[in-house]
């Protein structure tokens, strides 16, 4: 009880000093709890949606995926004949059955040909209005579509794009473009998953999406009273002869849940990973806080030991303070986490996914996990300072405050730090020299962890040298004030090292990812320059195939020297070693593709692969299946006949673009696959006549004006698109890393605040002998800047090393260019100086307000 009282007294006596550490715990716990609450709420939302939209039994074509969204190579959804509806209705246990048609391989535009698809990446779905859809949608304005000239749109999409009744829209599918006017607006009765949904009547949907009536993509079946879904599935399967995919409501919901769940899991674990980084940074803050508090209370602890307190009691007293800090910060963190989850839901709503707070899900495990994690991390972080406090002798009561340096511990730290750093460097070297990416990745992970730990442990040793260099470069110009700032930073290298390490972790990850991202963009750009011999690339960013009409429009464009069509299909391969490989991709293109993509070959000439009944394979595939020039490969084409093709070329597996592709000509594919089963083009390449690139570029855009679903890009556009995609991902990661950097800034603030308290008498004496308030504040700000720049130097140097090693692994995949983004690195380094200035504002202000006489009289 005495230990608890002492701990409580000390905790509340230094509550101001504990506040920033509590904020670090709060932020870390809040991020963990917010992530868990948000992901649980998303799961609850989608579970409700899937339960509401799934009919008792759903019948779909064999080619459809479990979620029903797969389209065949011709861009149309897999369909069943209308006769299946009659078969289903005749099955016992069926109360009602209704045929429906829908497709997500569509683009919808307004009258100005502006795309109405969601910007969040959610699908655009066009389907037939039916009773099953009416379970989740309510017509709130106008009326449901009747006839080919009418369409209904969901309210969220209508509000976002300012659509109203009577507005004309165009539905673009593989069949062509269907125009209609908005007859009604429907509102979701469950959460909108972010999709843009448009409804046509059934005959119109059949013609617009499939090109003919009398077919359905699925049949929704409702069970009669007392009939279970499993029993109904058996009866429907028997009635349809087992020729179609039949799923119960649970199976359909599970498939949809799995499809969405994989994305949610990636997002969840990524966010938890960044929360872990914030916890790691917070550990340094907590260690620093308790180390400094123990040092400031050395005489007090010595008196406690002198009057009979045991080492265990002193140790336990500090740990109880940590327990109180962890509990306080974690409780607030759990509440803040729920607030973060609500904020994330609002943010998602801004992107089109309207998540309702009515579905807010806080499982009992979430606050428990947050509390346990926050408390355990805080207590563990305080263990070393507590152990140090237990070693304070009773004679310390006779000395000035401040624990003497432990020389033996310093030597052990230096040796351990050098060993860890050396081991980490060895891991990074082995990763860079690895011949396989999988093997190198293991060494890279080990090298990153060990080098990070090594820099953390050896930080105090590095601080002495680095701070002196920074002081000579930056501080000496400020005269005595600058020299005092340098000496203050050097006074306790352990404290400076721990404070800098907190900032180092976040900046190391920023530097590493910047190097990797820049190298990927530079490598891809270099590969484009070396291998792509075409001027223009025409494609749909959502993967929608290019219709024959659009391809024809490209071919008719004036100023083009050649146009190359590019298709992808599947087939079952039977190789010379007797093995059969199911559902393997094969790329069919015009012979000019050998010029458009200068793919390196290890045997033969790629142009020969486009001869009749010929093909190419890549060298790894050839080695695995004992294939050489002249070998025969039997291919059973999907939706087509079986062909015996001769291998005329073997390409290099080191390619970045079309890596691992196997090529045939479109003419060869057409020989074995019926015209109505031929896949549509995935891409179309076009090259301008000499000197006509600019005019051909404009002409292509004009030719495809009526096909707004397709993008025309020259090589500059394509490089910029790649850069933008990687940039968006990096910005998201930087945003998540910002939490760790915020906690690190709190660490700098806390260190300075506690060091000001520790140096109260010293500050009073300096003021007494003539140091002005302005000079005092400048001294503290300079000290903060030096500590921040020290952490930035370590972090950026370490991160660039990690990034350069990661690029060596990427080189095994063909990304051979290492590019250091110096503008980003320099901006981060300069930004760190401003971070230091910001962190010093409050401590410097408090130091400047000290009463000189009271400060001198401080014990």
Image: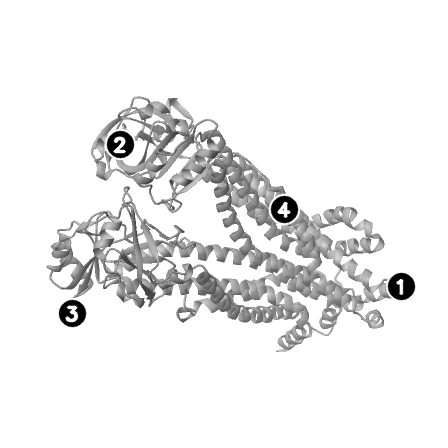
Occupied quadrant, residue 549: top left
Quick one: label 4, few (<14), some, or many (20+) residues within 10 Å?
A: many
- What's the CA distance linking mark 2 and mark 3? 51 Å
Q: Position of residue 173 (x, y in %)?
A: 30, 47
Q: Residue furthest right?
A: 769
Can residue 316 be seen from the camera position used here? yes
* Residue pictured at 30% horizontal, 39% vertical: 548
As helix, strand or loop, the secondary structure at mark 3 comes to: loop
- Dividing the image into 4 quarters, which one contains the C terminus? bottom right
Residue at which label 1 appears: 769
Name the foreground residue: 805 vs 534: 534
Q: Position of residue 240 (x, y in %)?
A: 13, 53
Lateral position of residue 733 relative to residue 162, left or right: right
- Give the residue number, with chain letter if any, for mark 2: 669
Position of 257 with respect to 426 (left or right) is left
Q: Secondary structure at mark 1?
A: loop
Q: Secondary structure at mark 2?
A: helix
Q: CA distance from mark 1 to mark 4?
A: 40 Å
Front position in the image: 730 or 103: 103
Label ID, residue 225 = 3
CA–CA distance between discs 3 and 4?
A: 68 Å
Query: Which residue is identified by label 4?
Result: 796
Observer able to see residue 581:
no
The label nearer to you, 4 versus 2, is 2
Labels 3 and 4: the sequence-earlier one: 3
Q: Is 306 placed above or below 447 here?
A: below
Judged by depth in the image, the label closer to the viewer, 3 or 4, is 3
């Amino acid at each position: 009880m005495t230990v608890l009282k002492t701990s409580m007294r000390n905790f509340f006596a230094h509550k101001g000093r504990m506040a920033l550490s509590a904020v670090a715990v709060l932020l870390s716990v809040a991020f963990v709890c917010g992530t868990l609450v948000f992901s649980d709420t998303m799961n609850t939302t989608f579970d409700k949606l899937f339960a509401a939209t799934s009919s008792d039994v759903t019948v779909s074509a064999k080619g459809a995926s479990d979620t029903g969204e797969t389209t065949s190579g011709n861009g149309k959804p897999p369909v069943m004949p209308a006769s299946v509806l009659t078969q289903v209705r005749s099955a016992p246990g069926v109360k009602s059955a209704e045929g429906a048609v829908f497709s997500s391989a569509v683009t919808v535009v307004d009258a100005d040909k502006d795309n109405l698809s969601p910007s969040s990446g959610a699908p655009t779905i066009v389907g037939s209005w039916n009773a099953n859809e009416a379970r989740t949608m309510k017509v709130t304005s106008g009326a449901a579509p009747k006839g080919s000239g009418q369409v209904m749109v969901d309210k969220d999409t209508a509000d976002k794009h300012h659509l109203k009744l009577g507005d004309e829209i165009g539905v673009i599918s593989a069949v062509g473009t269907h125009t209609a006017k908005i007859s009604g607006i429907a509102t979701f009765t469950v959460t909108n998953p972010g999709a843009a949904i448009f409804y046509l009547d059934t005959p119109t949907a059949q013609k617009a999406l499939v090109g003919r009536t009398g077919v359905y993509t699925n049949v929704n079946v409702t069970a009669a009273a007392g009939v279970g879904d499993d029993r109904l599935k058996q009866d429907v399967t028997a009635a349809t002869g087992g020729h179609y995919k039949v799923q119960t409501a649970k199976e359909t919901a599970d498939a949809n849940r799995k499809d969405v769940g994989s994305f949610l899991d990636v997002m969840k674990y990524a966010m938890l990973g960044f929360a872990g980084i914030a916890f790691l940074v917070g550990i340094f803050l907590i260690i620093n806080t308790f180390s400094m508090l123990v040092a400031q209370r050395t005489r007090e602890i010595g008196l406690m030991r002198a009057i009979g307190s045991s080492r265990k009691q002193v140790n336990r007293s500090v740990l109880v303070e940590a327990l109180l800090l962890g509990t306080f910060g974690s409780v607030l963190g759990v509440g803040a986490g729920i607030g973060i989850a609500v904020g994330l839901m609002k943010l998602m709503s801004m992107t089109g996914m309207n998540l309702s707070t009515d579905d807010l899900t806080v499982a009992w495990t979430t606050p428990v996990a947050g509390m346990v994690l926050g408390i355990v991390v805080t207590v563990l972080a305080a263990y070393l300072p507590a152990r140090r406090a237990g070693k304070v002798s009773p004679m310390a009561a006779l000395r000035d405050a401040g624990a003497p340096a432990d020389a033996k511990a310093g030597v052990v730290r230096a040796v351990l730090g050098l060993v860890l750093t050396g081991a980490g460097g060895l891991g990074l070297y082995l990763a860079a020299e690895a011949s396989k990416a999988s093997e190198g990745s293991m060494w890279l992970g080990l090298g990153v962890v060990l080098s990070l730990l090594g820099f953390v442990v050896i930080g105090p040793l590095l601080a002495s040298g680095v701070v002196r260099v920074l002081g000579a470069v930056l501080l000496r110009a400020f005269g005595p004030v600058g020299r005092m700032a340098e000496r203050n930073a050097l006074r306790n290298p352990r404290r400076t090292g721990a404070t800098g390490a907190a900032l180092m972790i976040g900046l190391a990850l920023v530097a590493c990812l910047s190097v990797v991202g820049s190298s990927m963009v530079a490598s891809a750009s270099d590969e484009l320059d070396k291998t792509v011999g075409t001027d223009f690339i025409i494609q749909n960013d959502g993967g929608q195939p290019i219709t024959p009409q659009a391809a024809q429009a490209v071919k008719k464009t004036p100023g083009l020297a050649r146009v190359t069509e590019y298709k992808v299909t599947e087939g079952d391969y039977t190789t010379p070693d007797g093995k059969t490989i199911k559902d393997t991709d094969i790329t069919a293109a015009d012979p000019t593709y050998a010029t458009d993509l200068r793919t390196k070959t290890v045997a033969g000439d790629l142009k020969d692969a486009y001869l009749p009944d010929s093909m190419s394979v890549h060298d790894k595939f050839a080695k695995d299946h004992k294939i050489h020039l002249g070998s025969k490969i039997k291919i059973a084409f999907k939706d087509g006949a079986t062909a015996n093709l001769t291998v005329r070329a073997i390409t290099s597996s080191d390619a970045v673009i079309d890596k691992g592709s196997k090529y045939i000509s479109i003419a060869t594919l057409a020989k074995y696959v019926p015209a109505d089963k031929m896949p549509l083009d995935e891409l179309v390449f076009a090259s301008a006549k000499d000197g006509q690139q600019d005019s051909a570029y404009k002409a292509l855009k004009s030719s495809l004006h009526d096909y707004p679903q397709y993008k025309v890009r020259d090589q500059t556009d394509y490089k910029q698109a790649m850069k933008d995609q990687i940039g968006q991902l990096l910005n998201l990661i930087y945003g998540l890393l910002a939490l760790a950097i915020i906690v690190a800034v709190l660490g700098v603030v806390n260190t300075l605040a506690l060091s000001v308290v520790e140096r109260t008498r010293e500050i009073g004496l300096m003021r007494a002998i003539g140091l002005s308030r302005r000079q005092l504040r400048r001294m503290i700000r300079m000290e903060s800047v030096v500590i921040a720049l020290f952490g930035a130097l370590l972090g950026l140097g370490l991160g660039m090393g990690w990034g350069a090693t990661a690029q060596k692994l990427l080189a095994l995949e063909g990304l051979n260019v290492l590019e250091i983004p110096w503008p980003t690195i320099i901006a981060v380094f300069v930004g760190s100086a401003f971070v230091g200035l910001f962190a010093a504002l409050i401590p410097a202000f408090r130091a400047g307000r000290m009463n000189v006489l009271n400060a001198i009289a401080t014990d």
